[in-house]
């Protein structure tokens, strides 16, 4: 059997899929033949199969370098459900468990071994690998090797030892996102041997990108979740630990099942919260960016940002945790001027080199461009990664095209006010004070400095304060206004602002909208009834089903989902490792009448068919009896 036939057989019999997606076939064939590869593939695009299938097809054991213990555990659990001999070595294991896994590896009883990079680099682990036939090395989340990246991990720099010690073993480096600079760095630092580079489309068409201006962000978040994702799993990213805890508490007070996650929590709390998020339905995790890398939960229906990320790479990586199952999901973010100031302050106050600060500033500017664009957000996002596209029809700008307006006069008023404040007192002022002057507000501070006598006092009364904040934020993004991050966010002009003041440059601005508004959602996922473990057991024991018409596809899907939840609880694994929602959807739609027909459903491999086939067919049979008014057996 040639390599291609072998790969197709493994795909069908082990993982239950009839055909490869995108460039999977070529990647797998290249690796089976012994070549090195760099793979850039979006989250949910099927990266895992690109090394799991070659590991099963080649002689020896595949070694997967994975940075997170939780990810290892879930992937190993999913492989066990598919009948694959897999194990892991990590710090969460007891000494007897470590010894047993090492014994299995030496005895050739493992097809895949997941190892954290710091564990892999120990002499004990390397000596173990020296005594084992190796099929390949897969380096997951390989962008962590880049010191320019958003998730640099120094231990990844030492993975070049694999090239020195196991030069004949093929290696594949995988990540969901990397610009040209990061791709080059990954190849050099990991010392890949003339790797073939595979760059899949970065487009995640099932994700709707939505970005709005901040206006009481927690209220906006609550409106968004209640209106569009009640009872569904989601991730909310905040910049600080305090904001994480406050936001989680505010959601809980509003009846939303929310949990916090940040580095300041003790490890038991963090791990417990992460375990609940992965294994239970309808949990909203509020977290810093320390959470989520490698999270393999496919049914995250939304990722929300209450603070501005550092770069488009970070934004793409974080939003990519939504909708891994291919069903509709949302990437929702609110931001304001203070976010811009805070991110620039973090860059300015960093102890990094001038070159690093220059690159970081450029990445932040690119993200601000994505936030402020009036064009299709997906086009702008994909263009950053060098991919051309056309308007998507599934982002906020496509669905509700924002208006542009000639903001030249407004910009001149604001710039002039900043200049006159500084000229009158010899020092600068912050945004709120300048806006108060423009709007003619006689605050105590305005009168203290005599700024009600400035010629710019009241000349901007035609715009609301929120509109002036929008103008100012866009002028900062255009580098016409500078915010002194060292001194209380004082505003000052840049050299480029002179062109605007002299009328030599026209300024087109995005018109401010209600950042709290919930836009129409024409492609929202179906509203699903959530069931508890007790409800699932009761439904399956007494033949009851969720409220609704027995003969509907949705009701059958819920019955299967309840059965899956019960099985997952019994096995102590996340529900999606039993079957993905997409597989249950297909079963509910096709209603196979036999195990042979069930075999044709995507995601039903040989082991799962043997293990669960008869139970699923029985559930479908009971559904047919109820459908035609006969009593369930």
Image: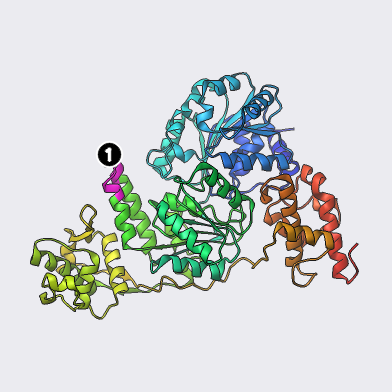
Indicate the quadrant where residue 112 lies: top right
Q: Residue at x 60, y 35 (%)?
A: 30
Residue 266 drawn at (x, y percent): 49, 43
Within 10 Å of disc 1 (Cα), the crowding (few <14, some 14-19, many 20+) is few
Is 356 left or right of 387, judged from the image as shown? left
Quarter of the N terminus within the rendering: top right
Vertical side of 111 occupied by 492: above or below = below
Q: Secondary structure under badge 1?
A: loop
User: Does the magenta stretch mainly form a helix, a strand or a loop?
Assistant: helix
Q: Is residue 600 left or right of residue 306?
A: right
Snapshot quadrant of residue 282: bottom right
Q: Residue at x 15, y 63 (%)?
A: 498
Magenta region includes residue 355? yes
Q: In this picture, which residue range is highlighted in magenta?
A: 346-358
In depth, the one of 143 and 233 nearer the eye is: 233
Residue bearing mark 1: 353
Q: Is residue 507 visible from the viewing direction of this image? A: yes
Residue 384 visible at all: no
Look at the image and say whether residue 93 sits in the magenta stretch. Answer: no
Q: Give 272 or 219, whichever is nearer the viewer.
A: 272
């Amino acid at each position: 059997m040639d390599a291609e036939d072998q790969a197709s057989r493994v795909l069908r019999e082990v993982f239950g899929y009839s055909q490869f997606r995108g460039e999977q076939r070529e990647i797998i064939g290249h690796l089976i033949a012994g070549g090195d590869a760099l793979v850039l593939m979006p989250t949910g695009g099927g990266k895992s199969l690109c090394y799991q299938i070659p590991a099963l097809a080649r002689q020896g054991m595949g070694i997967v370098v994975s940075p997170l213990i939780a990810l290892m555990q879930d992937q190993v659990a999913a492989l066990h459900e598919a009948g694959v001999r897999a194990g892991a070595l990590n710090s969460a294991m007891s000494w007897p468990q470590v010894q047993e896994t090492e014994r299995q590896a030496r005895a050739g009883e493992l097809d895949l071994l997941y190892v954290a990079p710091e564990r892999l680099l120990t002499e004990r682990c390397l000596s173990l690998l020296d005594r084992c036939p190796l099929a390949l090395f897969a380096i997951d989340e390989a962008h962590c090797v880049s010191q320019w990246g958003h998730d640099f991990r120094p231990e990844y720099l030492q993975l070049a030892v694999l090239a020195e010690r196991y030069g004949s073993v093929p290696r594949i480096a995988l990540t969901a996102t990397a610009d040209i600079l990061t791709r080059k760095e990954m190849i050099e630092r990991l010392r890949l041997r003339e790797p073939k580079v595979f760059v899949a489309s970065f487009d995640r068409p099932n994700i709707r990108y939505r970005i709005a201006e901040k206006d009481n962000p927690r209220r906006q978040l609550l409106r968004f979740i209640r209106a569009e994702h009640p009872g569904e799993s989601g991730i909310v990213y905040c910049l600080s630990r305090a904001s994480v805890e406050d936001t989680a508490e505010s959601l809980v007070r509003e009846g939303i099942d929310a949990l916090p996650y940040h580095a300041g929590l003790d490890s038991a709390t963090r791990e417990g919260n992460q375990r609940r998020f992965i294994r239970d339905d309808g949990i909203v995790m509020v977290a810093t960016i320390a959470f989520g890398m490698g999270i393999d939960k496919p049914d995250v229906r939304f990722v929300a940002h209450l603070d501005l990320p550092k770069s488009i790479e970070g934004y793409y990586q974080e939003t990519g945790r939504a909708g891994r199952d291919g069903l509709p999901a949302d990437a929702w973010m609110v931001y304001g001027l203070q976010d811009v100031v805070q991110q620039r302050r973090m860059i300015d106050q960093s102890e990094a080199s001038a070159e690093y600060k220059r690159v970081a500033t450029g990445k932040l500017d690119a993200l601000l461009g994505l936030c402020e664009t009036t064009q299709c957000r997906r086009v702008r996002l994909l263009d950053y990664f060098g991919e051309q596209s056309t308007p998507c029809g599934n982002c906020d700008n496509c669905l509700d095209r924002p208006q542009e307006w000639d903001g030249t006069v407004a910009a001149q008023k604001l710039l002039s006010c900043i200049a006159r404040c500084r000229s009158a007192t010899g020092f600068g002022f912050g945004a709120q004070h300048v806006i108060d002057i423009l709007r003619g507000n006689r605050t105590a501070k305005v009168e203290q400095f005599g700024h009600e006598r400035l010629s710019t006092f009241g000349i901007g009364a035609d715009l609301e304060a929120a509109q002036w904040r929008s103008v100012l934020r866009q002028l900062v993004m255009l580098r016409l206004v500078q915010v002194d991050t060292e001194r209380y966010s004082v505003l000052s002009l840049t050299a480029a602002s002179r062109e605007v003041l002299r009328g030599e440059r026209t300024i087109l601005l995005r018109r401010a909208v209600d950042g709290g508004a919930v836009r129409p959602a024409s492609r929202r996922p179906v509203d699903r009834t959530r069931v508890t473990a007790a409800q699932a057991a009761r439904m399956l024991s007494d033949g009851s089903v969720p409220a609704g018409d027995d003969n509907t596809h949705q009701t059958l899907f819920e019955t299967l989902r309840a059965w899956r939840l019960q099985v997952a609880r019994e096995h102590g694994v996340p529900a999606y490792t039993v079957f993905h929602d997409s597989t249950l959807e297909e079963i509910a739609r096709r209603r196979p009448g036999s195990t042979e027909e069930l075999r044709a459903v995507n995601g039903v491999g040989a082991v799962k068919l043997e293990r669960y086939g008869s139970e699923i067919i029985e559930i479908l049979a009971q559904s047919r009896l109820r459908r035609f008014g006969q009593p369930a057996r």
